[in-house]
């Protein structure tokens, strides 16, 4: 994973999924959500979390595209929320 912001920028998903994820970011809680989404006993570093989230999201996208009845839009949105929130943790903080 060389440049996470490039990977996120090149991610092509339906607009509705992305909009829903953006609205959900304010409710994201690392301890609660990562434990459930990537089956982690404690939150890993943002880099590690993102790698696992990218893998899980890619599987969700493949399931969605295949039209599989096991697809969960709620889980897919939760994965996108977590990816966006974790990516924000990697950005250098600017401030005065």
Image (cartoon, rainbow, N blue to C red):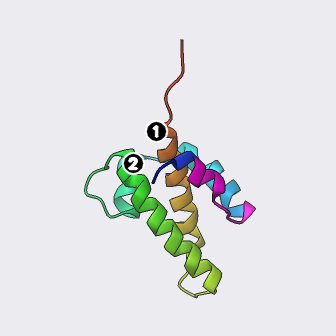
Foreground pick, 60 / 73 = 60
- Give the labeled residue for mark 2: 47
User: Is disc 2 surrounded by few (<14), some (14 to 19) or many (20+) residues within 10 Å?
Assistant: some
Q: Which residue is mark 1?
A: 90
Secondary structure beneath label 1: helix
If the image is split into quadrants, where does the N terminus sit? Answer: bottom left
As drawn, is 43 to the left or to the right of 86? Answer: left
- Residue 53 showing in the rendered view: yes
Quadrant of the image containing the C terminus: top right
Residue 51 in picture, x, y percent from top left = 41, 57
In space, the residues marked 2 and 1 are separated at their CA atoms by: 8 Å
| Mark 1, other Cα within 10 Å: few <14 / some 14–19 / many ≥20 | some
Question: Badges 2 and 1: C-beta atoms under 8 Å apart?
Answer: yes
Which residue is pictured at 65% across the width and 49% down the height?
23
At a point 35% along the width and 52% down the height, the residue shown is 48
The residue sitting at the left extreme is: 41
Residue at 56% x, 81% y: name it.
Answer: 63
Residue interval drawn in magenta: 6-15
């Amino acid at each position: 994973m060389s440049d996470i912001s490039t990977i996120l920028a090149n991610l092509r998903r339906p607009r509705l999924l992305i909009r829903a994820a953006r609205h959900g970011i304010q409710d994201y809680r690392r301890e609660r959500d990562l434990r459930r989404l990537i089956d982690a006993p404690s939150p890993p570093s943002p880099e590690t979390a993102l790698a696992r989230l990218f893998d899980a999201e890619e599987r969700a996208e493949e399931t969605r595209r295949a039209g599989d009845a096991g697809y969960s839009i709620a889980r897919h949105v939760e994965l996108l929320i977590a990816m966006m929130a974790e990516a924000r943790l990697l950005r250098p903080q600017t401030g005065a």
